[in-house]
Amino acid sequence: MKTRFLFIIIVTVSLILSACGGGGGGAATVRVGWAGSPDTLNPGMAILVEAYTIFELVYDSMYELNLDGSFTLTLAESVEVSDDGLVYTYKIRDGIKWHDGKPLTAEDIAFTYNLYKDTPEYPYLNGYYTPYFDSIKADGNNVILTLTEAIPNIESQLVFLYVLPKHIWEKVDKLEFENFEMVGSGPFKMAEYVQNEFVRLTANKDHFSSPPKVDEVVFQTFENQDALVQAIKTGQLDMVTEMPNTAAETLRAEDNIEVVVGAPLAPGVTDIIFNQVAPENCPTDAGGLCTGHPALRDRDVRLAMAHATDKQKLIDLILLGLGNSGLTLIPDGLGVWYNDALKDYEFDVATANQILDDAGYKDTDNDGVREMPDGTQPLNFRLNWPSDSINAPRMAELLSEMWAKIGITLELQAVDPDALTAQCCPAFDFDIMIWGWASDPDPSALLYVYTTEAIPSGSSETGYSNPAYDELYAEQQTTLDFDARKDIVWEMQKIVHDDVVYIIPFYDANVQAYRTDRFTGWITDQAKVELSDVTSLIVIEPVK
Amino acid sequence: MNRTRAFLKKTAWSLFTIIFVIILNFFLFRVLPGDPARAGIRDPRLKKEAIEMLRVRFGLDKPVINCFESLNPIEVGSCAINPLDTQFFIYVRNLMQGELGISYHTNRPVADILAERLWNTVLLIGAGQILSIVFGVVFGIFAAWKARTSVDYAAVTTSLIAWSLPTFWLGIILLFWGSTHGFPLAGKATPGMSSMPLLQQWGDIARHMFLPTLTYTIVYMGEYTLIMRSSLMDVLSEDYILTAKAKGLSTFQILKDHALKNAMLPLVTVIAINLGFTVAGAIQIEAVFSWPGLGSAIYEAVVRRDFPILQGAFLLIAVAVILANLIADLTYNFLDPRVQTE
């Protein structure tokens, strides 16, 4: 019995020793560390950003999204739009091949778009991107896309509709298909996928527009962010897509590591949500309870709170300085859509107190907390946040301190994210919440959140309602002229900023790092920073 | 006769426990707040129809059980419906057919996911268990044999410290140490290894296993050492050992032929129970070293509200623990004839 154990130990040790020194070989392999893993490789069913990162590399779509927010035609060499803006005719390039060698044709594209359109179970690709599709046909080399109405943002509708090979997808169950062997046409080919461990991609050197210069990219999942940081420090990784902000300082001090900070590909917004739903707008049919504090329906109270919020302090203490002060739900990472002409409310406690005094919110019983003008309720608000948030508890504490200076007190409580969703919308069973959004390349989705129409649907978190704003929202959806639409979008941001619908403490930054001694050419000078995006991975080269 | 009856009785109890777990497992997740079809998706443009389709696909549109549409919030529904068309009986029926459902989050069959993860966990924890048992028993014997000498005190102190170390803390310390000695910090294998010769693949896995196994071994070795030591010291104080000494047997012979077999009894119990929990994995170790085992699968499923995975994993763990206990019981019968007559 004992000898057998001994044998096992010896075998184990000898295996360890024999493996030392084994490794990658001569290929130029980019080793990327990330904290997640794709949920599924079936593009229709995927939700997580990690899955989309892989799709971007392995598939092509009609348009490529550049880091400056603009779009480039990829699969098609040209596009013609009919005068009424309803019919798009894409002329598909010749000679594009799938990774298995078969040619990619207009048939494939039409098949894919119809697949997305006809599969209502696909949460994003159907409900989200195809509602304007009327019909899609292949005609020789052309794909003819007919819309139900003319829209200004066809690029952002098509950019995430990854084109799939018809010869594979017509034979599979479109919901159950796991797609582990992903056959695409993009700059990288799927080589090996082990769920929750790694994704290994090899370069498609024959890609029609952007053949990569490296041979392989490997995405390795780390469940432990300390290990992730340690791995790039010791050279086990060449790039990390995320890390705690606390690690940025340590990594900056390292010789061969460069830390980059910028807006993420899907720019994120952290928001302080005020329940301001008016009693007549309460969506009782959809389960609305509308228990919000009446003071929050008063713009003066929200304005005073905005003046009393020291955003710079929040950024410095919570994000360690790695973030930008925010204005509305439209983040600065959206480039031209972001209204940078707006002026934020100055941090000034005296002004804030003056506003509340003038509006009649006085501390009548001298307990340090102001009361409503009619003397009934004190300005004591419930503040909730999702319990899985890392930053929100600290922000709640800081807000509680800041707003105490203007006679407003808070009851702080973290709530399970699902329970918070139930409390939020369309129930409106809260006073103030801390939450966030991630943005599309097009501003329309987040602009919708402010509309009256969104109140019963559960998308509106504030219950804000402004007919002038609603009209502009409808107008921008059908304004085809880019500059005219931009002016409307800017005007809409001005309206909601003036009305202090939210306080946006900051726009979240993407903090990434790469090793300078392994690969050069990472793209870091754009409005958005995403080193794992195809734009970087096709241009980087091994250090000689 | 007696032995068969005892065996049947114990097996029956185990089966009963498993059925209880199956029922509890189902309702436990249904009383949690929140809608699994909405977890992870919060998007203004997502159509209600898409969410409804997801609910239909996962069977969430059906009433939980007769008289109840949902359990949180409690919604009373019609009692006069076909019970076979409720979530509960569909769940039981699928289970009977060996189907654990489809993971909400990854859209893959739960059985596939659990099988991959189970193998990884068994590999890691199995190696850790074997090593910690071997070292624990050896150190325990040494400590008992050299009782109340400096060897004993050193062994006891080390074991106590090792046993009380927080697993995740020890793991992180070893991870930092290992990172500067060329040990991989995450996963089970180096990507691209699958095309290498088999021996090299095993070597690669062994290299990945080294740090987590070491962590596991250090912590559990302490436990086994202490149990082995105290149990052996009990036995060594028995009269028959004195007799053996009087017969002039060497210390080695006394330990080997007379003391060890009896002293192993308590250890067998602990090992059996620990083996049951082996399946649950060591969540902390798996999280620190990103080991793709069952423990990390459970953790992810909790975060994502992936009920089918949780139900499957809990059932698997329950069955493993119950089986391990059954085996421990039966082994006891075999090792210790006294148990059987009671």
Image: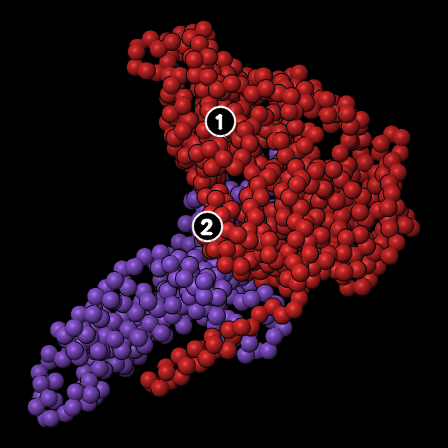
Q: Is residue B155 above or below residue A360?
A: below
Residue at mark 1: chain: A
Chain A on-screen colour:
red
- Considering every residue shown, the one lying at the far right of the view is A140
Residue B48: x %, y % from top left: 62, 37
| Callout 2 amino acid | Val
Q: Mark 1 points at which residue?
A: A311
Residue at figure coordinates x 45%, y 40% from the top left: A390
Residue A524: x %, y % from top left: 64, 44
| Callout 1 amino acid | Lys
**10 Å neighbourhood of mark 1: few (<14), some, or many (≥20)?**
many
Q: Which element is circle 1 on?
A: helix
**What quarter of the picture does the C terminus of chain B occupy?**
bottom left
Image position of B337 (left or right of A97) = left
Residue at mark 2: chain: B
Image position of A93 (left or right of A267) = right
- Judge by depth and name the residue closer to the eye, B76 or B27: B27
Chain B on-screen colour:
purple
- Judge by depth and name the residue closer to the eye, A100 or A275: A100
Image position of B134 (left or right of A510) = left
Q: Name the residue under label 2.
A: B302
Q: In this view, does B108 lie above or below B151?
A: above
Q: Which element is circle 2 on?
A: helix
**What quarter of the picture does the N terminus of chain B occupy?**
bottom left
Same chain assignment for discs 1 and 2: no
- Judge by depth and name the residue closer to the eye, A262 or B86: A262
Residue at figure coordinates x 43%, y 13% from the top left: A350
